[in-house]
């Protein structure tokens, strides 16, 4: 009833091609942004920022980056944790070795270093496909694990191998408080989500999708496979690298290579698969599912005052979480984002479905 | 999906979300001192994390049942499962730190300690890391909120080298010897390296560093290196499944267990139980005794386990790590008691007040005896500049069925540790642009 586009006429190509062609979507998106930028910083408690929103935003960003590679270009990657690590450690080195380096610049330079590494490890994708490529990208994971553990230059010769940053500020404004950290992450996520959305709607995004759907046919119609695949690797690992730098700098503050281990790569891949391959919003929904649900399940027995032992609660968390993954993959193999778009289709016809 | 069920899903999601919001606000009663317990009862480190966590929990239950709390202030606790993972640990810390009357944090993991070290000064909650954590944080002049009570990895490594030197008949006899450090490849395992390198330079022994990828279930290549290099001694810096795996690999390689020395985290029952007789002769540092004789353990059996309130199996009460959990919790409770002496008996202490209590702990032998810890540990007395309190420790050896002490008490060599701690703390301070605490700050 409310969600209906009757009477919304497009009189220009510009209006027809905008990201949210339906007025209600635009209003909803603006409302969401207003909540995220204005209401939450005013109202939410510290725990919500530090333990839920910040990790959610950063991993959404990483999932977004991975979705470009896996969802849009069809190149399965298990090296996401590695590219995050490269971003984090590169940003760390820029921050400690160059005095007076602005925070944003180090984060972006960290992303650029991840881009270089991503393209390097993307080269095998020109020859190998599918699961074999996934195995090849595993090499990135093991290589970076090894490099950041063993080459002490990367960790600024820290004796314990753990690095830490503090006293972060953006143009003189301190980003130590949870709200300012949250706003910094939110800013990055919004800018990158907008960029990503526009990239996938542009010619390069169509090249990626053509490559994903059938690479031989794409090559026949004049799309250069090398260019398309490597740009996907580059854009993806840039975003993932920035997310990694944010994870280290803003969320953890001090980290070791274990923060970006193979589990992280799998976690991100699951986010993308469950959230929805080839969908920007899917990255966010997937991240929410993977990050928030375990925390929620972990706390449920406590609210109801059910005396569960910590170990049992933790095992239950894994079991229910696993069962839900299977459930959602059976109900909707295209991911949670597809559920949302199906719901939207129904809403447009409601209450008189035909 | 039909609209109706979609609406249901949305409603459930909304309820869940609001629950997530409401969670930290719960439990705001007065007169209760809250102890957040970060634990790991699942995962690769669970065999060792569980008795530790049980010890901490049982001590709180015992104090409530026997004494009715600290001067009438009841103790409460809540556990949060970290799985030894840093990000989960940070989440647990954020979840529990804001509770009313939260006293202190014991993260039970060096990785989590590193992440929290920068956070605790802002949140004004002390971080106790008994026998682990950041070695430099012994220097209370820079690390105001960290308390590596009773030892760090530097004191541990130092004492092991002293012990090996004594075995050889003098530290000068170490010249030309080869000592291998088989370590968990994480900040935990890497912490002792600077000290061992320093000692290697002074005494002229060769240090070979053999990393084991976490969690340490696959160690074939590490022990191949041991076999090739044939070191005179192996120092084992492991935790969780890594320890028993290392012992099994040592047996497979034929490396004598008598020449192996573990840190105090590699010298508990879960590490050797599976290996049993074959681990006979394996040595490790011991911060505390094991066994059910001490009075405090008798009290726990009486007030907690006999009433069916025990946190774990009764026969594990008094194991090495269980007793260590007791000590950690006892020091926390005593810090609260000490703080109450200054800030008001029978009141709930804030994190800042507990910090003062931790900094002014003075548990002499008489007090330890009264607490039921006679013989379990040595007296602890902290100060503004020394957040460790004591470094005394012994070596114990596995005889196939239990741990027996096999050395006298050792103390870390101040002359080596002190300058290293100062240098490391100063470096930390300059990296973080901190200034040392003034003498006035020390008084407060």
Image (spheres, rainbow, N blue to C red):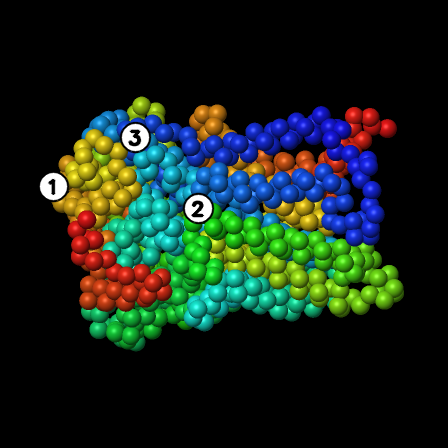
Q: Secondary structure at mark 2?
A: helix
Question: x%, y% of residue A298?
Answer: 50, 35
Mark closest to the chain's N terminus, 2 or 1: 2
Nearer to us of marks 2 and 1 is 2
Q: Which mark is residue B32?
A: 3
Q: Secondary structure at mark 3?
A: strand
Crowding at dot 2, Cα within 10 Å, few <14 / some 14-19 / many 20+, comes out as: many
Foreground of the two, A232 or B7 = B7
Locate residue B391: give its quadrant: bottom left
Cα distance between the residues tagged 2 and 1: 37 Å
Question: x%, y% of residue A324?
Answer: 63, 36
Which residue has dot 1 on it? B366
Foreground of the two, B220 or B240 = B240
Q: In screen coordinates, is A240 left or right of B232?
A: right
Nearer to us of marks 3 and 2 is 3
Chain to which mark 3 belongs = B
Q: Secondary structure at mark 1?
A: helix
Chain to which mark 2 belongs = B
Mark closest to the chain's N terminus, 3 or 2: 3
Q: In screen coordinates, is B168 left or right of B365?
A: right
- Find out whether the residues at labels 2 and 1 contact each other: C-beta distance under 8 Å: no
- Find out whether the residues at labels 3 and 1 contact each other: C-beta distance under 8 Å: no
Crowding at dot 1, Cα within 10 Å, few <14 / some 14-19 / many 20+, comes out as: few
Image quadrant containing the N terminus of chain B: top right
Cα distance between the residues tagged 3 and 1: 28 Å
- Find out whether the residues at labels 3 and 2 contact each other: C-beta distance under 8 Å: no
Which residue has dot 2 on it? B89
Q: Which mark is residue B7?
A: none
Chain to which mark 1 belongs = B
Foreground of the two, B434 or B261 = B434
**Residue A49 sits above or below residue A224 on the image:** above
Q: Residue at x 48, y 40 (%)?
A: A42
């Amino acid at each position: 009833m409310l969600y209906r586009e009757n009477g919304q006429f497009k009189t220009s190509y510009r209006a027809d091609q905008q990201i949210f062609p339906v007025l209600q979507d635009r209003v909803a998106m603006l409302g969401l942004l207003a909540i995220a930028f204005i209401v939450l910083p005013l109202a939410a408690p510290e725990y919500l920022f530090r333990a839920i929103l910040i990790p959610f935003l950063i991993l959404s960003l990483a999932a977004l980056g991975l979705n470009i590679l896996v969802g849009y270009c069809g190149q399965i990657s298990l090296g996401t944790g590695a590219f995050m690590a490269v971003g984090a450690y590169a940003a760390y080195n820029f921050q400690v070795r160059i005095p007076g380096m602005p925070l944003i610049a180090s984060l972006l330079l960290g992303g650029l270093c991840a881009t270089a590494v991503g393209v390097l490890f993307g080269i095998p994708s020109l020859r190998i496909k599918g699961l074999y490529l996934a195995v090849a990208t595993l090499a990135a994971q093991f290589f970076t694990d090894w490099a950041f553990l063993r080459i002490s230059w990367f960790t600024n010769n820290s004796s314990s191998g753990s690095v830490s940053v503090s006293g972060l500020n953006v143009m003189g404004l301190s980003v130590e408080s949870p709200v300012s950290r949250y706003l910094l992450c939110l800013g990055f996520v919004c800018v990158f989500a907008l960029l990503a959305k526009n990239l996938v709607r542009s010619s390069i995004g169509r090249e990626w999708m053509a490559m994903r759907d059938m690479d031989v046919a794409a090559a026949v119609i004049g799309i250069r496979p090398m260019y398309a695949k490597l740009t996907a690797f580059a854009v993806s690992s840039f975003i993932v690298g920035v997310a990694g730098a944010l994870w280290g700098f803003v969320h953890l503050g001090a980290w070791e290579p274990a923060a970006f281990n193979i589990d992280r790569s799998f976690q991100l891949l699951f986010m993308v698969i469950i959230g929805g391959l080839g969908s920007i919003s899917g990255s966010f929904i997937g991240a929410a599912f993977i990050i928030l649900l375990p925390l929620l399940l972990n706390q449920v027995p406590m609210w109801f005052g059910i005396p569960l032992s910590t170990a049992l609660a933790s095992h239950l968390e894994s079991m229910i979480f696993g069962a839900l993954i299977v459930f959602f993959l059976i109900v909707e193999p295209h991911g949670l984002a597809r559920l949302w778009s199906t719901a939207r289709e129904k809403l447009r016809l409601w209450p008189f479905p035909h | 999906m039909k609209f109706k069920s979609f609406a249901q899903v949305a409603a459930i999601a909304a309820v869940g979300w609001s629950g997530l919001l409401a969670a930290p606000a719960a439990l705001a009663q007065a007169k209760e001192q809250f102890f957040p317990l970060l634990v790991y009862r699942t995962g690769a480190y669970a065999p060792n994390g569980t008795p530790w966590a049980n010890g901490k929990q049982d001590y709180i239950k015992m104090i409530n049942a026997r004494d009715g709390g600290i001067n009438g202030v009841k103790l409460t606790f809540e556990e949060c499962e970290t799985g030894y993972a840093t990000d989960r640990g940070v989440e647990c810390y954020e979840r529990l730190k804001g509770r009313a009357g939260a006293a202190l944090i014991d993260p039970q993991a060096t990785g989590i300690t590193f992440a929290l070290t920068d956070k605790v000064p802002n949140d004004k909650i002390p971080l106790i890391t008994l026998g682990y954590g950041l070695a430099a944080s012994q220097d209370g002049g820079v690390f105001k909120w960290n308390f590596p009570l009773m030892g760090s990895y530097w004191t541990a490594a130092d004492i092991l080298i002293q012990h090996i030197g004594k075995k050889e008949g003098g530290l000068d006899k170490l010249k030309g010897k080869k000592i291998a450090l088989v370590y968990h490849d994480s900040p935990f395992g890497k912490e002792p390296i600077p000290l061992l390198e320093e000692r290697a330079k002074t005494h002229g022994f060769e240090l070979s560093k053999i990393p084991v990828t976490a969690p340490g279930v696959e160690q074939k290549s590490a022990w191949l290196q041991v076999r090739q290099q044939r070191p005179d001694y192996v120092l084992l810096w492991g935790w969780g499944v890594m320890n028993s795996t290392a012992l099994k690999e040592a047996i497979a390689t034929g490396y004598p267990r008598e020449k192996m020395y573990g840190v105090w985290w590699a010298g508990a029952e879960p590490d050797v139980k599976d290996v049993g007789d074959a681990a006979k002769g394996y040595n490790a540092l011991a911060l505390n005794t094991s066994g059910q004789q001490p009075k405090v353990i008798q009290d726990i059996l009486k007030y907690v386990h006999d009433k069916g309130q025990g946190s774990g199996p009764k026969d594990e009460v008094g194991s090495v790590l269980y007793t260590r959990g007791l000590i950690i919790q006892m020091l926390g409770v005593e810090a609260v008691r000490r703080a109450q002496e200054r800030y008001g008996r029978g009141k709930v202490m804030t994190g800042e007040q507990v910090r003062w209590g931790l900094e002014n702990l003075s548990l002499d032998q008489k007090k330890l005896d009264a607490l039921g810890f006679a013989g379990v540990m040595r007296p602890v007395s902290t100060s503004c500049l020394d957040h460790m309190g004591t470094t005394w420790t012994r070596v114990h050896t596995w005889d196939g069925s239990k741990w027996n002490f096999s050395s006298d008490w050792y103390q870390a060599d101040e002359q080596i540790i002190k300058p290293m701690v100062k240098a490391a703390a100063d470096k930390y301070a300059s990296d973080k642009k901190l200034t040392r605490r003034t003498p006035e700050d020390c008084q407060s």
